[in-house]
Amino acid sequence: MCEANAYVIDGENKTLVMEAVDTVEPEEDGLRLTSIFGDQKFVKASIHALSLVDHQIYLKI
């Protein structure tokens, strides 16, 4: 599987926002995350980093 988990980072802390993220789409004020199950979540954040080998997306508010 190629999906990733999305986290918001705040200093040394990271908080899980969504599991099994399939798509990340930019919107006017942030990002729309969609999981492989069709769940969607809008986050007022930007992409901080991607760890493709670890299947993790790091977002920064």
Image (cartoon, helix red, strand yellow):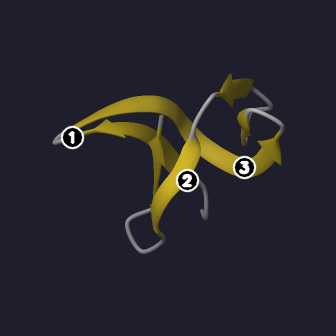
The one nearer the camera, 14 or 38, is: 14
Residues at discs 1 and 2 in contact (Cβ within 8 Å): no
- Counting residues from the start of the chain, the first of labels 2 and 3 encountered is 3
Tell me the tag on residue 24: 3
Nearest-to-viewer mark from 2 and 3: 2
Image height of 51 relative to 18, above or below: below
Q: Secondary structure at mark 1?
A: loop
Q: CA distance from mark 1 to mark 3?
A: 22 Å
Q: Secondary structure at mark 3?
A: strand
Q: Position of residue 58 (x, y in %)?
A: 44, 50
The image quadrant of residue 45 is top right
Q: CA distance from mark 1 to mark 2?
A: 15 Å
Q: Secondary structure at mark 2?
A: strand
Residue at 55% of width from left, 53% of height from top? 47
Q: CA distance from mark 2 to mark 3?
A: 9 Å
**Number of numbered callouts drawn:** 3
Q: Is residue 27 left or right of residue 4?
A: right
